[in-house]
Image (cartoon, rainbow, N blue to C red):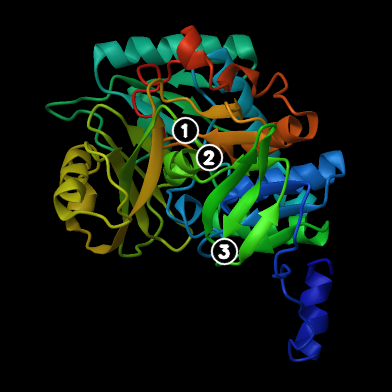
Amino acid sequence: MKRYSAFAIAREALRHHTGWERAWRSPPPRAEYDVVIVGAGGHGLATAYYLAKNHGITNVAVVEKGWLGGGNTGRNTTIIRSNYLQPSSMAIFEKSRSLYEDLSQRINYNVMFSPRGTLMLAQTEHELRAWKRTAHANRIAGIDSEMVTPEQIKQIVPIIETGGPRYPILGGLYQARGGTARHDAVAWGYARAASALGVDIIQQCEVTGVDRDANGVTGIQTSEGAIRTRKLCIVVAGNSGVLADMAGFRLPVESVALQALVSEPIKPVMDCVVMANTVHGYMSQSDKGEMVIGGGADGFNNYTQRGSFHHLEETVRALIETFPMISRLKMLRHWGGIVDMTGDRSPIIGTTPVPGIFINCGWGTGGFKAIPGSGWATAEMLADGAPRALAAPFSLDRFTQGRMIDESVAAAVAH
């Protein structure tokens, strides 16, 4: 793999850009692999990269029914933070946030990580108490997170209205080292780095069946033919239940659409991410000037990847009181992503009832921020055959043992 650099750009400019190589290989599938990962989104590609980089396992295939990064990785609002409440959540999200900080240098691809800060507003007394509790938990865990006053919030976000008649801002939880990254670049960067280490990335290859024998998984059936493997990892977000059904077991997840939109581009007006959970909306400004706006998930199970106007109208209407200026903006585009929700709003990383099949799912509405940490932990699990400390709390059997990692109430909105 040729390194990207300023010198490379200058050299190729002199060559009229005829010397650039493909970012990643697209080989036909081989008959057998040591590990097959289903899903070429951020989590699947990160898993493949860390398997090769950290554990030396390179006979790996990443199988994708569509195009690389075309699922939730390319359909989210790019928020990165780690100020969760539960210790296991803080550990994996902080691992991920810290990996994001120098990810561009490690994989030689600019993922445009921007530590612009994330601000979670408290607009009720209950929410204010909840954020204070989270701030103390973060401090004990060594995570940089602090409570800020309405006056400080106004300094951080000048366009905000702190004295709204229905939901005045009473304070907020601020993580200065949180921020955003470019979602497509994260997928492309991991794909390029994994491919350079020998991983096969196979697009337009849909899984149609899972083969098993008395000892566990033996391979998969795909639209490109059969592929043999004794280790299969399912990393397909909202379609996790579909793949699990093919393999012969059920998952405690529900798939729903999460919707978002962007406005027309305007001059810079805010340089951090703001989440207003009471009115159920969040907003940031992209590098191109668009206001990136999102809200909650649909209230019914579905597999759509389109937005619905009534839901987007509800989200924008809720945010206008806190950000009056957005009432004058026009919507540029809107979309939806299929998210997989667990009962406690925490992910599942672990083994399954079928020997040799591993699962990484249930990230709900907050999967993008976890990509590096999730890939790191899942790679450890695939290399060892069982999860290590980072992933162990998120095992599938926690739902039968009553070991819930409840972020549904703690996070209010788990973005």
For the point 38% across and 47% down, the residue is: 338
Instruction: Describe the element under mark 1 as helix, strand or loop.
Output: loop
Callout 1 amino acid: Gly
| Label 2: how many Cα within 10 Å (few below 14, some 14–19, many 20+) | many
Vertical relation: 240 (above or below) 94: below
Tell me which corner region of the image, top left, top right, bottom left or bottom right, holds residue 414. top left
- Asked if residue 182 lies left or right of residue 125, the reply is right
Q: Is 58 left, or right, of 336 in this rendering?
A: right
- Residue appearing at x 79%, y 29% in the figure: 384
Q: Secondary structure at mark 2?
A: helix
> Can see residue 104?
yes
According to the picture, the residue beneath numbered tag 3 turns out to be: 205
- The label shown at residue 362 is 1
Q: Is residue 112 visible?
A: no
First-in-chain label (3 vs 2): 3
Tag 2: amino acid: Ala
Give me the C-alpha separation between circle 2 and circle 1. Answer: 17 Å
> Is the Cβ of the residue at disc 3 closer than 8 Å to that at disc 2?
no
Q: Which residue is mark 2?
A: 247
- Crowd tier of the residue under label 3, counting other residues whose Cα lies within 10 Å: few below 14, some 14–19, many 20 or above: many
Front-most of residues 374 and 226: 226
For the residue labelled by badge 3, is the local secondary structure a helix, a strand or a loop? loop
Badge nearest the viewer, 3 or 2: 2
Q: Along the polypeptide, which appears first: circle 2 or circle 1?
A: 2
Q: Is residue 210 above or below residue 170?
A: below
